[in-house]
Amino acid sequence: MTHWAAYDAGLRARGSLTVWFTPEAATAWKAEPRIGRGGQPSYSTLAITTALTLRAVFRLALRQTEGLIGSILRLLGLDLAVPDHSTLSRRAETLAVSLPKAGSASVHLLVDSTGLRLCEPGEWLVEKHGTKRRRAWRVLHLATDADTGRIVASALTDRDADDGSQVGPLLDQVDGSVASFTGNGAYDRDDVYTEVTARHPDAVVVTPPRSSAVPSDTAETDPTQRDRHLRCIAERGRMGWQRTSGYNWRALVEADVSRWKHVIGDGLRSQTDGRQVTEVAIAADVLNRMLELGRPEYVRIA
C-alpha cells in the first residue's frame, strides 16, 4: 500500500463509527469503593472520560451524551449503568485528563493560541428575557510536537492573558527535553527566552524579532539568541532568516489550530473554569487519537 493510499484509508477510518468494550473496560466501568468519608461514586474515571470523549467528537449536549451512551450500551448488550447528565457535569469539574508524554527524545515545540467563544444560552432564553448577554470568549494556548503533530500541552486563559505569559505553564507539561521552541512575534519577549532557558538551557528559541528590535548591549561580545536572529535578518532578510532558522515549521501548529476548529468546534460548551479545562484536555486527546488513524508520511524525492 502506498503512502497516499494508507493516508486515504486513514481518513475514511476517521469517519467510521466502531465502538467496542473490552472485558476489562466493562469491569472497570463501575467505580472502586471509596475508603474515605463521603458518598460512594457510581462510575469510574474511565466511564466519565468515555462519555465526555463521545460528547466532544459528536458535539453533543450532556443530555444527548447520556442518550448516546445508553443506546451504545443497549446495542452492545451490556448491562452497565448510564451516567446521567448531572453526574457528567459534576465529575467534569475535577476530572484529571493527561496528555501523552513526549518521552526521552528531544521535542521541537511549536506554540500558538486561538480564541474559543463561550456558547450562549438557547434562543428561548433570549425570547423569554428579551436580552442577550455580550459574547464572551477564552484563549486556548497549544504546544505541539513538530515531528509527530501531537498536542503535548495546552492551557486555557481569559482573553486578557497574553501568549508569552503561558510559556512556563506549557513547558511544565512537557515531559523530556525541548530541542527548540518556535512561536510567532507575540513570543518575542525577554521573559519567554528566560522561561525556556531556565528549563531547557540548550533549547533554541525561534521567534521573529519585532521590526523595531535593537541588539542588546552585549551583542558584540556575548550575543544572545535574539541578537543572532537580528544579525541573520540583517544579512539575509526576513525570508532568509525564516528558512535558515526553521521558523516556517510554525505553519504546522497553525494547521493544528485549524483542525481543532473544524473537528471540535470554535466554542466551549462548559460554563465553569474546571469543566472548561477538562473539555479542552478531552478535545486534545481526541485529536491526538484521530491523528494516529491517518497521518501522511512525507518522503523527500528531490
Image (cartoon, rainbow, N blue to C red):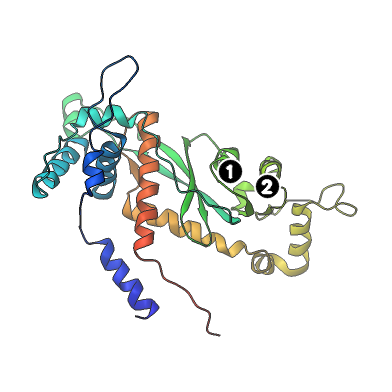
The percent position of residue 242, horizontal first and vertical second, equals 64, 65
| Vertical placement of residue 83 versus 58, above or below | above
Q: 117 or 17: which is nearer to us? A: 17
Q: Position of residue 65 (x, y in %)?
A: 19, 40
Give how far apart the Cα atoms at labels 1 and 2 are.
9 Å
Q: Is residue 136 visible to the viewer in this orientation of the structure?
A: no
Q: Is residue 154 above or below residue 287?
A: above
Along the line of sight, the residue nearer the viewer: 22 or 230 = 22
The N terminus: image quadrant: bottom left
Q: Residue at x 24, y 61 (%)?
A: 15
Residue at image coords 27%, 65%: 13
Q: Is residue 224 left or right of residue 126?
A: right
- Pointer 1 residue: 171
How many marks the image carries: the answer is: 2
Q: Quadrant of residue 128?
A: top left
* Residue ID for mark 2: 200
Element under disc 1: helix
Towards the viewer: 55 or 249: 55
User: Which amino acid, mark 2?
Assistant: His
Element on which disc 2 rests = loop
Q: Amino acid at mark 1?
A: Leu
Q: Report the side of 165 relative to 12 (left or right).
A: right
Asked if labels 2 and 1 touch by Cβ distance under 8 angstroms, the answer is yes
Say whether residue 277 is visible.
yes
User: Picture coordinates of residue 294 (x, y %)?
Assistant: 36, 66
Which mark, residue 101? Answer: none
Other residues around mark 1 within 10 Å, as few (<14) / some (14–19) / many (≥20): many
- Residue located farthest toward the bottom when viewing the structure as drawn: 302
Q: Position of residue 238 (x, y in %)?
A: 68, 64
